[in-house]
Image (cartoon, rainbow, N blue to C red):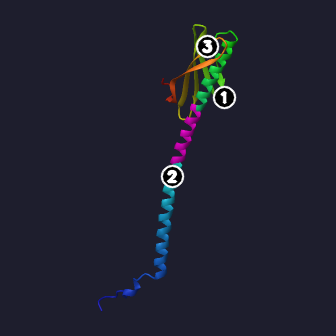
Amino acid sequence: MRGSRAPWHAYAVSSAQQRGAVWLTATLGFSALVAVELGALGVYVLAEQQTIGVAAAQMQADYAAQAGLAVAAALVSNGQSPDGASGSCGKARYTVSAKRAGAGWLVVAEGRAEGPACYSAQQRIEATVSGSGSVKRLGYVRPLGPTSAGRT
């Protein structure tokens, strides 16, 4: 015998130790996988919340523009000028600009609403309003959509 070495079976790993090592590796691997999936889910949820917030701002801006158009029609039917009318509708604001067009008015109603992350949504609707207050919508001047705050 050369030196005093431990017999080969002293280095052998018992089956209980092997099971424990496999269980520990599997647990750590599963925990890491769950952590990555939860992180990805969190990023997805934040992105969805912002998307929902922008869509809500767009709807509020459209609703405010329609409210401005209704106010303009009411003012015209009462014999008043709708030019310069403004107000709020929920969290959104509307402004109305109008020009005389023959017996009626050419009206542009604009709605604005603040959205998340420095976005503001705006909507402009163009219509003609007759002297009796009936409205004929000509269309949307600017498409419904978010714009960066401070830019036009």
Decide which of tag 2 and tag 1 comes sooner along the chain: 2
- Which of the 4 image quadrants contains residue 137? top right
How far apart, in angstroms, are the residues tagged by discs 2 and 1?
35 Å
Which residues are drawn in magenta? 43-58
**Residue neighbourhood size for the residue with mark 1, other residues' Cα within 10 Å, grouped as few (<14), some (14–19), many (≥20):** few
Q: Which residue is mark 3?
A: 84
Tell me where residue 81 appears, x and y as whole percent.
64, 10
How far apart, in angstroms, are the residues tagged by discs 3 and 2?
50 Å
**Residue neighbourhood size for the residue with mark 2, other residues' Cα within 10 Å, grouped as few (<14), some (14–19), many (≥20):** few
Q: What amino acid type is highlighted by mark number 1?
A: Gly
Q: Which residue is mark 1?
A: 90
Q: Which residue is mark 2?
A: 39
How far apart, in angstroms, are the residues tagged by discs 3 and 1?
19 Å
For image coordinates 49% across by 75% down, the residue present is 20
Q: How many marks?
A: 3
Residue at disc 3, secondary structure: loop
- Which of the 4 image quadrants contains residue 5? bottom left
Q: What amino acid type is highlighted by mark number 2?
A: Gly
* Residue 149 can be seen in this image: no
Which secondary structure type mostly characterizes the magenta part of the structure?
Answer: helix
Tell me where residue 32 appears, x and y as whole percent.
48, 60
Taking 4 as reference, is 89 above or below it? above
The furthest residue to the bottom? 1
Decide which of tag 3 and tag 1 comes sooner along the chain: 3
Q: What amino acid type is highlighted by mark number 3?
A: Gly
